[in-house]
Image: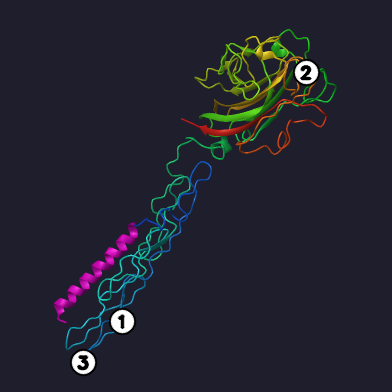
Amino acid sequence: MNRTTFRMLCVASFALIAASCSQGASSTSPVGGTPAGGTTSVGGGSVASSTQPGNTGGTTSTGGSPVTGGATRTGGSTPIGGSAGGVTTTPGGTTTSGGTTRTGGSSATGGSAGGVTTSPGGTTSTGGTTRTGGSSATGGSVGGTTRTGGTTSAGGTTSAGGTTSTGGTTGAGGASTDVVPWLNGYLWVGTCSNGSASGLDCPLLPDTGGACPNATATNFADRGVFRTVTQTVGGTAGTKYTVTFEVRGVLGTKCYTGGTMRASSTTPPTSPETTNDGWYVGGTPTDSKWNTYEIHVNPPVAGSNALSGTDDVYYLNAFPSVSGGLDSWCEMHETFPMKYTASFPVTGGGTIKLILHDSNCLGQMNCGGPNRQTTCANSRTIDLTGMSPQPTSPPSPTQPYKQSNGFYPQWLFFNVKSVTSP
């Protein structure tokens, strides 16, 4: 072939090789849509890894068909990742066979396999750009696009944690692990102390034992037993979080005043024998012998509407105070199934206290209904289907929950549904 023809073939081959490499450098498309090792979420952020073997092969041209006579070149320059072979010509005529031959084109695991394949003499691709894994991120984009062979970017656009908002809506395995890890799957039992029952009531004494403290104190807030569990709020110090949880269990009820009851405050529960909402925000307990279940949050969170004293306070066993016959609904001598979802705000680095207060150190046992029955014969149960995690100790798998000393205590079981921040 003449010098001009030869030069045009070389320029065309070089342009085709450059176009193939450019396509490989920008491709992020894996076979099947979802990348192998693509975006995988563990709790709050996305976690994965990116490994991408790259271009091996590239453009390979194997000579032409030599004719008799003239000079013959076989192979040409052979790079790895570039062109292998070359153009073989012979004086005496212009003969080429095959042209630029590639097989496969752009090939990806998890993306497009193959590429453009044409008949010999055209443009046939083999190998091209090969990736395994696609884009992967840990909490965002980690690693970027990495290739071995051809164009290689180590790291690419890398963000440690990516664009990660503190909080957002995070499930129980996410931010709750950092903010309130102890509450997810927590079983709160109004454990009956050893001793003798008093009718349908069991002894509720301090965890340290001994007699009922301050049994004759004038102020309700000083009288009787206080059982307190204190936990530190995790997350980022000073950051506001909203904890949403579901709770189920069996409790006696209590009257509260000065706050807000979420359920109707003027009528009895619509189905007191099956499911009830005992959530009450702010206020104080009335002075009576029925026990409380309280959540205290410190420091108080602005806008919570739950401030009582120095803490934000929430109660879990409130009932309306309307009359139900012998007693008000909120102080009947029976226990009720509880099942509801509620939320409350906390501050990172603060504290949460769970408090059970009983002024006469005698707690109602889970004896069910009716009100003022003569024997503890109708202990309640509650369906825990759908709670995750399930309790690994009583009240599951055996209900009604019965202690080894023969008493049937009140109890609540918590699942954290989400932890969010602004």
Q: CA distance from mark 1 to mark 3?
A: 18 Å
Residue 30 image position (x, y, % from top left): 40, 57
Q: Residue at x 49, y 31 (%)?
A: 421
Q: Which mark is residue 58?
A: none
Scheme by which the image is coloured: rainbow
The residue that mark 2 highlights is 362
Q: Is residue 291 left or right of residue 153?
A: right
User: Of the residues shown, which amino acid type is indicated by label 2?
Assistant: Leu
The rendered magenta stretch, by its main secondary structure, is classed as helix
The residue that mark 1 highlights is 75
Q: Residue at x 70, y 14 (%)?
A: 332
Which callout, 3 or 2, points at the residue further toward the start of the chain? 3
Is residue 18 on the magenta stretch? yes
Q: Find residue 292 and report its image quarter.
A: top right
Closer to the camera, 406 or 287? 406
Q: Which segment did they paint magenta?
A: 1-26
Is residue 9 on the magenta stretch? yes
Which callout, 1 or 3, points at the residue further toward the start of the chain? 3
Q: Find residue 268 and report its image quarter.
A: top right
User: Of the residues shown, which amino acid type is indicated by label 3?
Assistant: Gly
Q: Secondary structure at mark 2?
A: strand
Q: Secondary structure at mark 3?
A: loop
The residue that mark 3 highlights is 69
